Amino acid sequence: MTIIASNWKMNLDRQSAEQLLVEMASCPVGDKVKRIVFPSFTLLDLARATREQIGLANHLALGGQDCHAAANGAHTGDVSAAMLIESGCQWVLVGHSERRQNHKESSATIAAKLEMAQAEGLSVMLCVGENLAERQSGHAEATVTAMLSGSLPHKVDGAKLAIAYEPVWAIGTGMTATPENVMEMHQAIHKYLKNSGLNDVPVLYGGSVNPENANTLLALEQVDGVLVGGASLDAKSINAITLAAEI
């Protein structure tokens, strides 16, 4: 099973989101592909209703872009895992590089979010990845495995987990991770998970995926799917990436 996940980030209004979903529905998807969309919180209700109206309910999972580690309480601006489920989500994204950087989220905070999300019944896509300095210093693998170690709680359900490797230095910078870079890191992540007793956890690649590089990335043996950012906002692009997974 190949996962094609779309992270819309803080983009799209209701009209453009609905149109994007309608156009995504025109893309034929077989049993080999699982699609997940992570809209902004304000678009979850629209995405839920639209996918049901256009027949995507069984072919497109919904996810929240983040959740709080607490079940409820005085956490202004935050959303709980239970709230995401009530909004129709099956997944949640945690540990994205933008959350780690812009919101100063530690791996311990992310581990607490992951634990709460799974306790409520959500599947979790955990993001990990190194920055340019860490790669250039030769510490990329050590950085990512340390993130995994710190971000995975002691008790984790591998059946409700996916890992997204996102090299921060290759996102929106014009720099590109080579197939060799991707393969080496995915092998290291799979090895770490296996040694931790977490077998068969999918590992996705999330570094500036687009229709031009999707075929190459998805053909790599250790790549179980892709987490798409900017290209997921364009129907032709995300449909082309989805079709690449069918090959």
Image: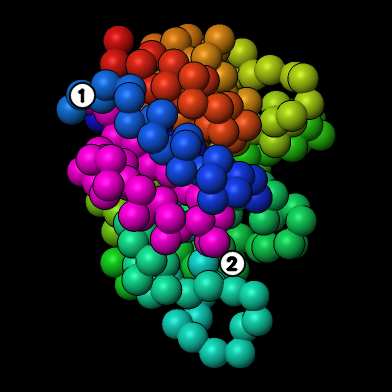
Asked which quadrant contains residue 245, the reply is top left
| In the foreground, 43 or 196 | 43
The stretch in magenta equals: 32-61
Q: Which mark is residue 108?
A: 2
Q: Measuring 27% from the left and 47% from the top, which residue is drawn there?
A: 53
In the picture, the disc for residue 4 is none
Residue 191 is left or right of residue 182, and the answer is: left
Examine the rendered structure and indicate whether residue 66 appears above or below residue 246. Answer: below
Q: Nearer the viewer, mark 1 or mark 2?
A: 1
Label 1 sits on residue: 30
Amino acid type, residue under disc 2 in the picture: Ala
Q: Is residue 10 magenta?
A: no
Residue beneath the point at 36% across and 16% down? 243
Q: Is residue 129 left or right of residue 31?
A: right
Q: Residues within 10 Å of mark 2 (few under 14, many from 20)?
A: some
Under circle 1, the secondary element is loop
Q: Position of residue 16 (x, y in %)?
A: 55, 40
The structure residue drawn at horizontal position 43% and vertical position 55%, both measured from the top left corner, is 46
- Say which element carries label 2: helix
Please state, as top left, top right, bottom left or bottom right, where the C terminus lies in the image. Answer: top left
Examine the rendered structure and indicate whether residue 88 appears above or below residue 39.
below
Query: Residue sitting at 41 percent across and 38 percent down?
Result: 21
Is residue 154 visible from the viewing direction of this image?
A: no
User: In the displayed image of the protein, which residue is found farthest to the front?
Assistant: 15
Specify whether 173 is left or right of 107: right
